Amino acid sequence: MSVSAFSTSHHSSVVGTLRAAGCVFAEDEAELILSTAQTPTEAAAMVERRAAGLPLEHVLGWAEFRGLRIAVDPGVFVPRRRTEFLVGQAAELAELAGRSGHTELAGRAAVVVDLCCGSGALGAALAAGLDRVELYAADIDPAAVRCARRNVAAAGGHVYEGDLYDPLPDALRGRVGILLANVPYVPTGEVGLLPAEARVHEARVALDGGTDGLDVLRRVTEEAPAWLAPGGHLLFETSEGQVSAAVDAVERAGLAARVVSDEEMYATVVIGTWWGSGRAGLGGEGHGRGAIGG
């Protein structure tokens, strides 16, 4: 039996199986599974794995993120739709820099680092919207690094394995225009309260942010000035309850902080801008003048 014939004749059965397993969007998921599977046998196995509780993205082997199909292997952190807001903010900053009239930036590639990159979705999605980009990504999880290398290849990016900034080339110091840091920010004591799809099937290192959820973030902000170009931006996601402490971490590092949010996407993003040691803490001065070029 062909896959198309299987899809037509078994669609309602698949929907019923998924619905019985508690999948709220059973019809949509059935269509995605049946359109992704290469054979009826593969389709049946995918339905079984999804019904057993595996994240849909791990079952499919990909997740949609800002219009891209991002490869996501089992165990790798699944990019959240709300994080598209963060990438959108980064894209706007890049566009503002391109219109800034700074002749020294003309013709230069945007230097982008995707830290705690997971699948590499953020860097890949941002790069897809830029004319020229130098893309670098890093993660401590070997499985995530293998996955990210597949996703950033189209942008000619480089992916490194290691703890935060440690594996990045020294030549990037002082040159980064956009630093995306999708750090884990769930407090250790709350990891056990996460939905099973995350708690059981994603790497804990991608979820656990320490006692108050901001341990990794503080390490990122402390070192950010050494890597950002003057006018460069650090962007990260946080929860509403962590905003005050997150902003404090950014400002203690000498970056000017501002908070943007999207209620519809339940997204809160903090943007820290590095103006150089002589201009630290100047708030929103020069907004949009980021040195995105290298």
Image: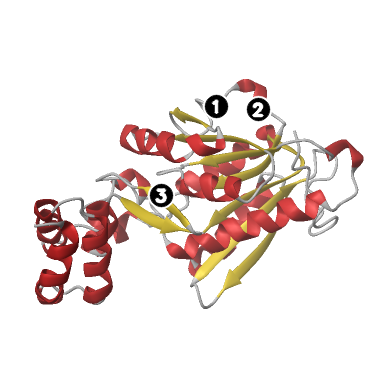
The residue lying toward the viewer, choosing from 112 and 215, is 112
Query: Which residue was labeled with disc 1?
Result: 168
- In this rendered view, identify the residue nearer to me: 101 or 228: 101
Q: Name the residue under label 3.
A: 70
Query: Where residue 293 sits: x, y (%)?
Result: 76, 38
Question: Crowdedness of circle 3 by 10 Å Cα count: few (<14), some, many (20+)?
Answer: many
Q: Mark 2: few, some, or many residues within 10 Å (few <14, many ≥20)?
A: some
Asked whether 68 or 216 is in front, the reply is 68
**Hey, which quadrant is residue 186 in on the image?**
bottom left
Residue at the (85%, 57%) spot, across then down: 285
Vertical relation: 287 (above or below) 176: below
- Residue sitting at x 56%, y 63%: 85
Residue 185 left/right relative to 173: left
Which structural element holds mark 3?
A: strand
Q: Distance between the residues labelled 1 and 3?
A: 23 Å
Say whether disc 2 or disc 3 marks the residue closer to the N-terminus: 3
For the residue labelled by badge 2, is the local secondary structure a helix, a strand or a loop?
A: helix
* Quadrant in the picture for residue 282: bottom right
Question: Would you say the residues marked 1 and 2 are in contact, meaning their CB atoms lie under 8 Å apart?
Answer: yes
